[in-house]
Image (cartoon, rainbow, N blue to C red):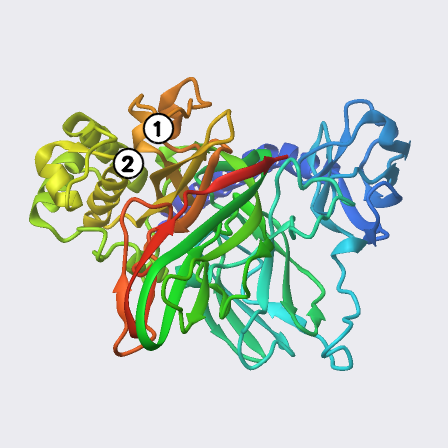
Amino acid sequence: MSTRSQKHSATGRSIAFVLIGLVLVLLGALALPRLIKNAAKPFIAAVDPPVGDPGAAVRIVGRNFGGERLDSRVEFDGVAPTASSYLSWSDDLIELRVPLYAETSMVRVRTDAGMSNPRMFMSIARLPVRPSGEGSGTVGPAIDSLSIDQGSIGALLVVRGLNFGSNRDSSAVQFSWQSAAAAFPGQDDGSNRGFISPAEDDAEYLSWSDKEIRVIVPDGAVSGSVSVRTNRGTSAARYFQVVDSPGSKSYTDRRTYALSSFVTISRVRSTGPNSLHLWLPYPESSPSQRGVKTLGRSIEPLVPEYRGLSLYQISDLANDKLLTVSHDHIVQVYAIETDIKADRVKAPPNPAPALYTLYTQADVFVPADAPAIKAAATKAAGRERNHYRVARLVYDALLATLRYDPASREDSPLAAFEAKQADAWDFSLLYVAMLRSLGVPARPVSGVVVDDSRRAWNHSWAEFYLYGFGWVPVDIVLGSGANIGAFEAPFEDRSRYFGNMDARHIAFSKGIVRVAPLSPDGRTITAKRRYSMQTIYEEASGALASYTSFWSDVEVTGIY
């Protein structure tokens, strides 16, 4: 190589080194402010004590809090306490009183430099208590680990530990649940406010063994604690963060209802030993319906609780003897308010949760496989695949096609669809059928609405499911502007009944309640347009030749 070529090569290398150096300097200059900002962000080393009573003093130890509080603040699950809660503030130590709403909270410090890392504070009320009574001498459940420490509604969570029991029975996994009314401790009235558990009927319990539980994160869960409750006690809680929601859901305007219902049996004709079984529904337990309790019964049921029903057995009914079976319940009902960002709605993972199979099939009430329903649903949805937008398109199409007629008594939802008129029962079933035919999980809801005079009117509405969010309520009849008897809708803007629900709707069944006959020779009776969508209401067997039954409507005996 010539001397001239060597000089050109050396010069090229020098220029390259200079350019690389300039790039590095530029990158450093760009990164320096971020590094400085991150270095100045507040950092929490510890919350002392990590477990205590709301209202008690707590110390937050760390750095970069600032010498004075000024506009800085501590946040418990994103909510700052009042100014009077702060006892002292320095760059490495904050002392304050824990706000009353902070039962199990992620604690962060926010300053002008940004948000700190989170640390958890847990109310002492959330710690397990020593069990008493049967099983008190045994070791209670203990969580060793969670398969994930954050996930969305509908995600699979594996809980590993000890002493969960070989099968679930009445045990449960408990997730944090929050509402305005549940934010204050010391108000426990036995309703178990503050927790929500997966639903057996929604296939959210996948498996249960002594050392491992596989569950689906349920609708209504919020960031907070996860614990396991058995008859041996409740485990210590682990923190779980609910993420990736396409919107928000809140439970407000709590109302407590005392309800009564009964069945009267008369005109009995029997020639010998006989038996009559009655399946009486009671209010559904859900994130928006809490604390369902039995206040009284005229006779003790054979099975007190089975999928929202109580089974009563009456043996050897005598001729012409009048008999009444009644039960009374109390339930707390919350209004549901949602704010859903359609662009953030995601498709479910593959495989999807089991409820996608459960609530996208046809059944004896929901004609999701009918060609006319499929064709109408496909036309309404067009090319849309976003489940939230699909639900809205089907809602609009059905309202444009059908007229609400409370006196309509068609033989089936398909007949109502062809007649272009439907009552609330058929309206809800058709809406659910159209959504299911498009692969959107949906279910009819049957129950009552309560007017200002405390009268309960039988009614049906619907819910559809969004992965990452949970169930979304829809009252298509009230949304159309129609009325249910003398019930005046609390929502002045009727369009809110797509996605929201008032606290005057009381659900007795969500989806079909399948009941199997108890006797090979049993004669079963079902019914439509009542306040529960169950396959069997009555079953007679033996020498019971005939009888007359009268099922009362739901009576509201008190509102609190």
Asked whether the viewer can see residue 100, the reply is yes
Relative to 420, 298 lies left or right: right
* Residue at left offset 25%, top offset 77%: 521
**What is the residue that sits farthest to the top in this orientation?**
492
What amino acid is labelled 1 in the image?
Answer: Ile
- Count residues near mark 2 (Cα–Cα under 10 Å), then give few for <14, some for 14-19, many for 20+: many
Q: Mark 2 points at which residue?
A: 424
**What is the residue that sits farthest to the right in this orientation?**
88
Is 508 in front, or is 342? 508
Residue 178: where, in percent of width, then height? 62, 43
Label count reads 2
Is 489 in front, or is 349? 489
Quarter the N terminus occupies:
bottom left
* Residue at left offset 29%, top offset 44%: 529
* Residue at left offset 28%, top offset 73%: 522
Asked whether the viewer can see residue 468, the reply is no
Which of the marked residues, 2 or 1, is nearer the chain's N terminus?
Answer: 2
Q: Name the residue under label 1.
A: 484
Per the image, label 1 sits on a secondary structure element best described as: loop
Tell me: residue 75, above or below residue 267. above
Residue 270: where, in percent of width, then height? 31, 71
Residue 35: where, in percent of width, then height? 66, 39
> Disc 2, disc 1: CB below 8 Å?
yes
* Residue at left offset 49%, top offset 57%: 217
Q: Which labelled disc corresponds to residue 28? A: none
What amino acid is labelled 2 in the image?
Answer: Ala
Per the image, label 2 sits on a secondary structure element best described as: helix
Is 544 in front, or is 331? 544
Is 468 in front, or is 110? 468
Tell me: residue 128, above or below residue 133. above
- Count residues near mark 1 (Cα–Cα under 10 Å), then give few for <14, some for 14-19, many for 20+: some
